[in-house]
Image: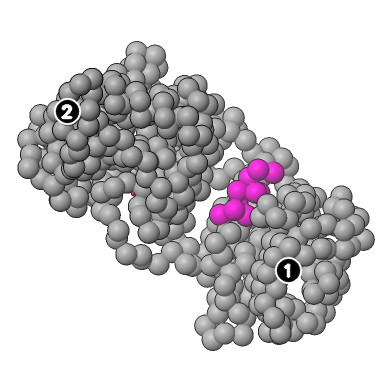
Amino acid sequence: MDTPGHPVIVLDFGAQYSKLIARRVREAKVFSLIEPYSIPAARLKALQPAGIIFSGGPASVHAPGSPLPDPAIFEIGVPILGICYGVQLMAQMLGGKVERAAEREYGVAWLEHDDDDGLLDGVDARTQVWMSHGDRVTALPPGFEVIGRTANSPYAAVADSARRLYGVQFHPEVVHTPQGKRILSNFVHAICGCPADWDMGSFVDRAVTDIRDHVGAKRVLCALSGGVDSSVTAMLIHRAVGAQLNCVFVNNGLLRKGEAELVQRVFRDHFHVNLDYVDAEDRFLARLSGVTDPEQKRKIIGKEFIKVFEEEARRLGHMDILAQGTLYPDVIESVSATGGPSATIKSHHNVGGLPEKMRLELLEPLRELFKDEVRALGCELGLPEEIVGRHPFPGPGLGVRCVGAITRERLETLREADAIFIDEIKKSGLYGDIWQALVCLLPVRSVGVQGDERTYEEVCSLRAVTSEDAMTADWFRFPPEVLQRVANRICNEVKHINRVLYDISSKPPSTIEWE
Ligand code: XMP
């Protein structure tokens, strides 16, 4: 897909903040991309950047093998902003000096400056900034001058305005630098000359044109799960090529209450998308019968999904293209300087592997977007809040929340309890504050009393977490009365549950899902 206008490119030197820098640039309505630090200057130039930002990174410029960009990048002739490690690199490569500081500087500092027509234009003369560095610049390269200093960093902000090279020792992209947005905005708008014209409306227009060019007269197949990413992918492609898109929605019997109905109502009835609804509940439950091992469950569900999907695709006739809701973080994970292979904690079930197996061309119209941008795009395309605002729901669905044996009856119990939990969260106005909320049915029974009767029934555990990206998570602090209402309703309304627990483990060491 073509990129709009001229992007500002963030070179990733292994900083946890690279994605945040790209987001901040997009928030300033300028399109931005992240590229690995090792990209050759010629390739970078071919992307026609309006400007370049060197991210921070954990390395020291003095360490052997520290990540260095192609020196020819300085000859491309567009403005460059170096952040933290990025400014140290610039100093080192352009003839200045970088030394190890006696002590690592970490935390809040106060920047003082009198730069009123450059990078710091409009920023308070004394403003809070966030520092996190070990090395520091001790001599500037020729052509550079100091434009801002802190008590510990005499070269906290530097510039060579003739060559349009800038550097800051602090992190303008984090919230602890309250005027950081202004600094990044000065860089992309005033210095790089980018107009503030990147928004979802312009994204849709361009994406629709690109998809039409790409698809031509071909047929597109899309696995629609009802989750945000596949829903937005489907809507965008539908907007572009209408009836050439065929969506397949597989009911694996592990869905939440009302899920299959919602997807059909929205996509088929409201938007008139070609939707193929496959009721495969019996097949999945037969395969899962007697299986209690989490990994085995995931593998069975994943394999069966691919089988069902392939059968449906064959039934629908010849398809040329498979659409997938791959997002930008997945794309950069595989190219970033730090994105090495990490241990597999759980085998994720997605449609990965399908395109090679089915020999279909891939179409990934969201591959340049972050999750919150995908939600904004969904709204722009008219999808209801029920879909764009929803929590993630894993591919193996209730299968990995029905801990222990999966039976139709236990799934029904879990589905009812889950619906009550989500309903009460929505009623209390907390749904949007929570990353993900779920109920697990445990393989344990406990004694209770209902009326005058002794009961011996199932136990469920509620889980609600806050998170930025699902890599780490913390348990959500509910007002006790919400938990009380949920527990009362579940015990009263769900036939086979007589005990409700609240899970207060964080990730790590626990994961979000139980299995
Ligand atoms: P864990 O349980 O590993 O989950 O902390 C992190 C996030 O990933 C979701 N998840 C999945 N998503 N297919 C998916 O598409 C899967 O197999 C899968 N397993 C876990 C989980 O719900 C959470 O948001």
Mark 2 CB within 8 Å of ligand 1: no
Task: Characterize the magenta stretch by its predominant secondary structure.
Answer: helix
Q: Please name the residue shown 70% across and 73% down the image.
A: 105
Residue lying farthest to the top in this orientation? 269
> 360 and 308: which one is in front?
308
The amino acid type, in three-letter code, at marker 1 is Gln
- Residue 283 visible in the picture: yes
**SS label for mark 1:** loop
Percent of width and height locating residue 371: 49, 42
Q: Is residue 111 magenta?
A: no
Percent of width and height locating residue 393: 34, 37
The amino acid type, in three-letter code, at marker 2 is Arg
- Residue 215 visible in the picture: no
Q: Residues within 10 Å of mark 2 (few under 14, many from 20)?
A: few
First in sequence, mark 2 or 1: give its number. 1
Specify the quadrant of the image occupied by residue 444.
Answer: top left
Specify the quadrant of the image occupied by residue 147.
Answer: bottom right
Q: Please name the residue shown 41% across and 26% down the image.
A: 485
- Whole-number angstrom distance, CA of label 2 to CA of label 1: 67 Å
Marks 2,1: beta carbons within 8 A:
no
Q: Please name the residue shown 79% across and 74% down the image.
A: 153
Relative vertical location of residue 410 with respect to residue 345 in this rendering, above or below: above
For marks 2 and 1, give the one nearer the viewer: 2
Relative vertical location of residue 97 with respect to residue 234 in this rendering, above or below: below
Q: Which residue is mark 1?
A: 169
**SS label for mark 2:** strand
Q: Which residue is mark 2?
A: 454
Relative vertical location of residue 43 with respect to residue 175 in this rendering, above or below: below
Residue interval drawn in magenta: 19-28
Percent of width and height locating residue 78: 71, 60
Q: Please name the residue shown 79% across and 69% down the image.
A: 156
